[in-house]
Image (cartoon, rainbow, N blue to C red):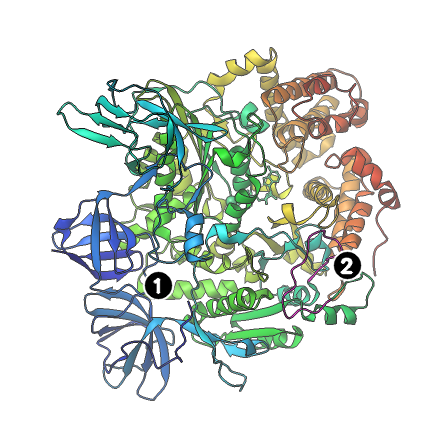
């Protein structure tokens, strides 16, 4: 018996014959085959969330199940691609259907015809368990893609292909399980997006994800395998910061999710990333990047799925023993998509119309980040960094609050800093990172005085903040000479160290060495400034503070010695 | 996308019903229909008096069809009305003769001219594949310093004006529409020449008349009035010369029609830009009225409200409009949007400006404070922003010093505002020399740089030079956002210092 649509309300469609379906099944809805997912089953009806526009869908059109849950394809061909929220390849869709996204159009996520050079790592007869590395494919010059046995398959390797060129449809191995049944294995596998991929052990994050952004790395660092969120009102720099991290952080693979944001921001990445080079591999950044683009004008339900599509792809690269960074801009749009579907299901809303399961879903998402021992015994990590867009810039709203509970680094973007074009506008006092303690030793190994300098910097910022409160009421008159100089020092720290323009060719990325050198030079000069009798009015000139502020933009990460030699360096 | 039947001799199977089964509230009616009705399908109800009302299908439940009527349900009864399903989504007919026409908020002529006879276009458009977009990066000179130098507009951008009631946003929008032009001699890139363009070379010193003539072919304006007062609509119609299409939904027109007006206007803009290859500037005013109409309709439908009673999907709904700006790879035209909205209570955190800011590529914010000081245009620089400026200005686009200069002007102005706040409490007597210089800088920036005449046009070079001269009033060691090289290169402007106050 076949199911047909009985009710249509925007992205929510109801069909009959609920016994045909299981929760989470991927379905094809209507004559054109819109992609949907089963989200509720009642005695007489099955509720579907449809990932495409339902305009023109009629009552009585067929609904067919695919027999499986909403899944993604994982294998060579992911890198340098752009997918929508349900992993349809956008470039291919454009070739087939033109500039607009047409309803019902389908295309396999991974190119079936492209041939990859497979190099086997195991021999016939080897005992293999789920997650084993069968071989590898050099997917891009930057990334070697390991071909993994699907997680739940164990047995002996009945056959394995020789080194050679294969396409995704050709089996490269077969495995005989304990029951004697033989399963073909391909270079790609499928995995349901809402289920986390298994690992053999979770490890605690202990290495920094170097982002090249000083305010993050030095003040509020994130570890490889950690989680962070970045709340901020519109125009405070969430997207530019996410792009910066995608460009410069020292992960092996980047998953960038444009979730309900602007089309042109995706276009910008697609324009920049093939040209920009990874400072470590010298290869174009696009070669290590997978993009998921479900922009604000694309269907809402697919926005909800985009987050899961992205994190599943991220887990898959992690399972190959790589360090993966996932950037989601913006998780608020994901939460709003949840709210919209929940509203149509007439569920009881909790706060501000959001469903009661918002916190648990948020927790589930960030819990998929982590440093792990993979099934194959290697170490891999998945770092998750989400942007949050609070309505009215008010951080006490549900999405910001619940996110804050489940991440360990919290970078609060400040509207007033953004107004003064002080970027990154990460508030240097309100933000925090619980990784700072664990990662201090890493920096200490790089620079003997790092810990001391950083503490002095933080203390000075706190002290200066108090003084500014005084100045606002009593004017500078109320301050001693030393206190005035502290305000000067604060300015040098903020403008000479924390500020870092994405547009500065020398400073958009700062290596750890540059960060450490700059910190040491600036804090050295600050100590001299505060320990000296020169009156505040002459201090800027006497200590060349304006030149010190410019140092970051004048010397790139290649010129560490020149930074250390300041003020005896000539600007180029 | 386009269907070629004339409007009412609809599709495969014209179904006419005589009964509305239930009428629920001001907007919604229920019909029992045969199968074959599509979600979102356009509906026409001819009421007893012979009046036509338009609507669309908003819910299908078995054989029950719920429709929403743009002109409301008042006066409708169970018998005597004829309901017709049109077999297609709400669409508008467009042809080349639309330039110069005046239409109502639903795209029907109101200028006494002939009906449009081209193909039908679905007013919801199709979401653009992000890989089909081409990144906007051609600088548009508006002649307004506060915009060109500080929050530059580029072709294909969506840059709204955040205003408040009583402020001169209409004047500013008209000025932008009149003055906006490309400066081909500044940029190295080839300019695409749309078919209606004439050959032209701009010289900075040509007279105003010559310039506006030269510009005529360059920008086509699509103007959508959404629930505005009659005199506002008349003013735009009069002052935006040249090739313009206007869609007018006045304050006393049906509220629900307001939801269609911007969609009809943007469908027209897409036709002009991507089928005829024109550069289109779309002015939508007032988006706050649009948002209120959406709230009214959502409330009538019983949708769960989120902030301030606005529905949770306000963001997606606004995005479905604003994202219809941009450029497409391989196509010559472009759509630049300048939506205007009024911030209720001057509150930028109100849901409409807030969500707009989250969608658009920056915003130009007007300030009541500057307006009171008779500064025109009263642009509040600090919260204003153009996100596409990074790639739209600089060497080969405007001038190499543009971006750093802008940065420095913002930083200095933010500092000036801080000092100003401080003096409100502690007075000016005890200020340091430097703080005094900042106060003077802030004043000069507002009165000489932001302020300019209602039809005064400054070239980008003039605006940037003026910026340098204003910075000349600050001690050199304060200019840390500028490299030593840039400072050396502009020493003579810095030394000239701020010009005297203009009368
Ligand atoms: N690190 C940076 N360096 C230089 N400029 C920056 C930086 N971060 C942000 N900006 C400036 O601020 C603007 C706004 O930043 P961005 O688009 O990232 O904001 P956002 O927080 O993502 O806003 P929204 O929530 O509306 O998407 C940018 O266009 C850019 O001009
Ligand atoms: Mg953003």
Residue A282 spot, x, y in % from top left: 58, 28
Judge from the rendering whether residue A416 lies leftward or rightward of residue B451; answer left or right: left
Q: Please name the residue shown 41% across and 57% down the image.
A: A97
Task: State whether residue B261 is above or below residue A12.
Answer: below
Residue A317 spot, x, y in % from top left: 39, 29
Residues in magenta?
A: B181-199
| Chain letter for the residue marked with disc 2 in the picture | B
Earlier residue among tags 2 and 1: 1
Residue B121 found in image quarter: bottom left
Residue B299 visible? The answer is yes
Quadrant for the N terminus of chain A in the image: bottom left
Q: Which type of secondary structure does the marked residue at label 1 adopt?
A: helix
Q: How many labels sit on residues?
A: 2
Residue placed most toward the observer, A409 or A202? A202
Residue on which the image places disc 1: B299
Q: Which mark is residue B458?
A: 2
* Mark 2: C-beta under 8 Å from nearest atom of ligand 1: no
In this rendering, do the residues under marks 2 and 1 share a single chain? yes
Residue placed most toward the observer, B154 or A165? A165
Q: For the residues carrying marks 2 and 1, which lies nearer the camera in this image?
A: 2
Q: Which type of secondary structure does the marked residue at label 2 adopt?
A: loop
Residue A321 lies in the magenta-colored region: no
Judge from the rendering whether residue B434 lies leftward or rightward of residue A144; answer left or right: right
């Amino acid at each position: 018996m076949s199911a047909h649509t009985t009710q249509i309300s925007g992205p929510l469609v109801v069909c009959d014959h609920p016994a045909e379906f299981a929760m989470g099944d991927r379905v094809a809805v209507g004559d054109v085959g819109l992609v949907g997912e089963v989200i509720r089953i009642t005695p007489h009806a099955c509720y579907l969330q449809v990932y495409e526009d339902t305009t023109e869908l009629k009552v009585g059109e067929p609904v067919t199940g695919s027999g499986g849950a909403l899944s993604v394809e994982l294998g060579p061909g992911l890198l340098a691609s752009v997918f929508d929220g349900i992993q349809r390849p956008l470039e291919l869709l454009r070739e087939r259907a033109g500039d607009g996204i047409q309803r019902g159009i389908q295309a396999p996520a991974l190119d079936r015809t492209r041939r990859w050079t497979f190099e086997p790592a195991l021999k016939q007869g080897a005992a293999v368990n789920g997650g084993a590395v069968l071989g590898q494919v050099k997917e891009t010059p930057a990334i070697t893609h390991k071909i993994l046995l699907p997680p739940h398959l164990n047995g002996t390797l009945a056959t394995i292909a020789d080194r050679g060129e294969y396409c995704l449809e050709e089996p490269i191995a077969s495995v005989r399980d304990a029951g004697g049944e033989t399963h073909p294995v391909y270079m790609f596998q499928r995995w349901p997006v809402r289920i986390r991929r298994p690992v053999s052990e979770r490890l605690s994050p202990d290495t920094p994800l170097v982002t090249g952004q000083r305010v993050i790395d030095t003040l509020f660092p994130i570890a490889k395998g950690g989680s962070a969120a970045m709340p901020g009102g519109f125009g405070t720099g969430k997207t530019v910061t996410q792009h910066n991290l995608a460009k410069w952080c020292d992960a092996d693979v980047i998953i960038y999710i444009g979730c309900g944001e602007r089309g042109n921001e995706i276009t910008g990445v697609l324009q920049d990333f093939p040209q920009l080079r990874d400072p470590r591999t010298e290869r174009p950044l696009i070669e290590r990047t997978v993009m998921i683009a479900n922009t604000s004008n694309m269907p809402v339900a697919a926005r909800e799925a985009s987050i899961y599509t992205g994190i599943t792809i991220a887990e898959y690269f992690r399972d190959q023993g790589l360090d993966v960074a996932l950037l989601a801009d913006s998780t608020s749009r994901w939460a709003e998509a949840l709210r919209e579907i929940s509203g149509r299901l007439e569920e009881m809303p909790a706060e501000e119309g959001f469903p009661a399961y918002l916190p648990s879903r948020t927790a589930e998402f960030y819990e998929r980040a982590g440093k792990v021992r993979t099934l194959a015994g290697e170490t891999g990590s998945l770092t998750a960094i989400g942007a949050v867009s609070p309505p009215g810039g008010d951080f006490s709203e549900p999405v910001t609050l619940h996110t804050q509970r489940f991440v360990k680094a919290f970078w609060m973007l400040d509207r007033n800093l953004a107004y003064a074009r002080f970027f990154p506008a990460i508030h240097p006092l309100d933000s925090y990172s619980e990784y700072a303690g664990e990662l201090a030793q890493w920096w200490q190994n790089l620079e003997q005085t790092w810990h001391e300098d950083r503490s002095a910097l933080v203390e000075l910022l706190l002290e200066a903040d108090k003084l500014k409160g005084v100045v606002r009421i009593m004017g500078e008159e109320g301050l001693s000479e030393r206190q005035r100089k502290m305000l000067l020092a604060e300015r040098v720290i903020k403008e000479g160290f924390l500020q870092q323009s994405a547009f500065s060719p020398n400073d958009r990325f700062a290596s750890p060495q540059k960060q450490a050198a700059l910190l040491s030079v600036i804090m050295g000069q600050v100590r001299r400034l505060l320990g000296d009798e020169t009156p505040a009015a002459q201090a800027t000139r006497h200590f060349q503070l304006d030149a010190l502020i410019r140092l970051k933009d004048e010397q790139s990460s290649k010129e560490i010695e020149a930074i250390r030699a300041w003020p005896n360096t000539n600007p180029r | 996308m386009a269907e070629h039947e004339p409007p009412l001799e609809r599709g495969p199977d014209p179904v006419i019903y005589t009964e509305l089964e239930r009428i629920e509230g001001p907007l919604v009616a229920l019909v029992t229909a045969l199968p074959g009705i599509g979600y979102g399908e356009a509906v026409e109800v001819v009421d007893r008096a012979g009046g036509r009302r338009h609507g669309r299908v908003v819910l299908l439940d078995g054989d029950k069809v719920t429709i929403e009527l743009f002109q409301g349900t008042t006066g409708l009864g169970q018998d005597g009305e004829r309901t017709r399903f049109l077999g297609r989504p709400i669409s508008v007919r467009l042809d080349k003769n639309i330039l110069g026409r005046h239409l109502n908020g639903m795209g029907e002529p109101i200028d006494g001219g002939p009906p449009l006879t081209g193909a039908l276009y679905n007013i919801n458009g199709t979401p653009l594949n992000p890989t089909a977009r081409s990144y906007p990066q051609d600088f548009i000179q508006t002649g307004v310093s506060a915009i060109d130098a500080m929050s530059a507009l580029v072709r294909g951008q969506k840059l709204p004006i955040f205003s408040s009631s009583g402020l001169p946003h209409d004047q500013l929008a008209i000025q932008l529409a009149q003055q906006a032009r490309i400066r081909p001699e500044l940029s190295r890139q080839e300019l695409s020449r749309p078919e209606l363009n004439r050959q032209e070379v701009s010289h900075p010193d040509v007279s105003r008349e010559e310039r506006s003539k030269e510009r005529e072919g360059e920008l086509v304006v699509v103007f959508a009035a959404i629930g505005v007062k009659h005199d506002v609509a008349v003013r735009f119609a009069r002052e935006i010369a040249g090739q313009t299409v206007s869609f007018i939904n006045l304050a006393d027109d049906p509220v629900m029609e307001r939801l269609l007006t911007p969609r009809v206007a943007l469908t027209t803009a897409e036709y002009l830009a991507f089928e005829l290859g024109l550069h289109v500037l779309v002015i939508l005013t007032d988006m706050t009225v649009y948002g209120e109409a959406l709230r009214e309709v959502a409330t009538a439908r019983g949708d769960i409200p989120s902030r301030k009673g606005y529905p949770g999907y306000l963001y997606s709904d606004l995005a479905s409009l604003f994202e219809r700006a941009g450029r497409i790879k391989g196509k010559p035209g472009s759509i630049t949007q300048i939506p205007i909205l009024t911030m209720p209570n001057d509150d930028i955190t109100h849901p409409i400006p807030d969500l707009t800011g989250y969608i658009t590529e920056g915003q130009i914010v007007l300030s009541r404070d500057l307006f009171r000081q008779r500064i025109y245009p009263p642009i509040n620089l600090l919260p204003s922003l153009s996100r596409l400026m990074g790639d739209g200005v600089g060497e080969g686009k405007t001038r190499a010093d543009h971006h750093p200069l802008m940065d420095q002007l913002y930083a200095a102005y933010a500092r000036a505002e801080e000092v100003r706040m401080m003096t409100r409490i502690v007075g000016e007597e005890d200020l340091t020399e430097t703080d005094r210089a900042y106060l003077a800088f802030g004043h000069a920036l507002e009165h000489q740089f932001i302020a300019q005449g209602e039809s005064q046009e400054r070239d980008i070079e003039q605006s940037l030079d003026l910026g340098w001269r204003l910075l000349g009033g600050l001690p050199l060691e304060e200019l840390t956002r500028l490299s030593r090289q840039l400072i050396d290169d502009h020493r003579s402007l810095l030394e000239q210092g701020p010009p005297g106050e203009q009368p």
